[in-house]
Image: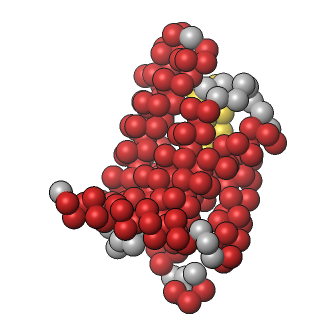
Amino acid sequence: MRSVFSLMHSQFSDSLRSLSRTRTITTVGLLLAIQMVLSSYGVIEVNDSLKISLAHLAVAPTAILFGPVAAGLQGALSDILGFLLKPTGPYFPGFTLSAALLGVIYGMLLYKTRQTTWQIIAARVLVCVVINIGLNTLFLTMLYGPSRLATLPLRVMKNLIQLPIDCVLLGTMCRLVKRIPAQSR
């Protein structure tokens, strides 16, 4: 158990340290821009509270290359900038927290690891269960009332259908990022 906490401490401190490098800031900025485009144009809206997006894929390279702090920061910034550029309702800080947690989860499971199939599946399952189904449903209920709980079965179904697709795409992203030479990171 102690080794898990020391690994997490190492990941977070290394990730925080990486934010002091210009190359890290510019790379995260570019990936943030890609995420903004994916979240604006790469969205299929089933209804006003159920959307399918590939924007999470732009957080994966940040998580793999720079860790949970950088990826969490990118996630939070993407939510705030997305609201400022294209508001789709009232601003709610819970969704910013969800976006940041996505980056932290990816960073904790994919940073400085081999990114095995099980780690990729675990990252997506955690995001689907904890964030997409859990927190985001809670936040929608807090914003719009208990009637949003009626969408829970649809949200679960959407995440179950999308999970294998997202795992394959995330695995492909991990393989692509591994090909980036270490000196250019």
Left or right: residue 152 versus residue 1 is right
Is 93 situated above or below 80? above
Q: Residue at x 51, y 82 (%)?
A: 179
Q: Is residue 92 left or right of residue 170?
A: right
Q: Image quadrant for the N terminus?
A: bottom left
The image shows residue 53, relative to residue 116, as above or below, that is above
Instruction: Identify the residue at image location x=74%, y=53%.
Output: 37
Q: Is residue 43 left or right of residue 113?
A: right
Q: Residue furthest right?
A: 85
Residue in front for this viewpoint, 46 or 152: 152
Residue 94 percent coordinates (x, y): 56, 32
- Viewer-nearest residue: 57 or 3: 3
- The residue under the point 37% across, 46% down is 125
**In which quadrant is the C terminus drawn?**
bottom right
**Circle count:** 0
On the image, the x and y values in percent for residue 3 come to 22, 64
Q: Is residue 115 or residue 7 the one in the foreground? A: 7
Residue 28 figure quarter: bottom right
Task: From the viewer's side, name the closer residue of 42 and 120.
Answer: 120
- Could you tell me which residue is drawn at 43 percent across and 62 percent down? 12
Where does the image place residue 159, in percent across and percent down from the top left? 45, 37
Instruction: Give the quarter of the image for residue 73.
Output: bottom right
36 above or below 7? above
Q: Please state the horizontal and vertical placement of residue 29, each as a whole percent of the image.
A: 71, 64
Q: Is residue 57 visible?
A: no
- In this picture the colour scheme is secondary structure
Q: Vertical placement of 2 versus 25: above or below?
A: above
Q: Is residue 98 visible?
A: yes
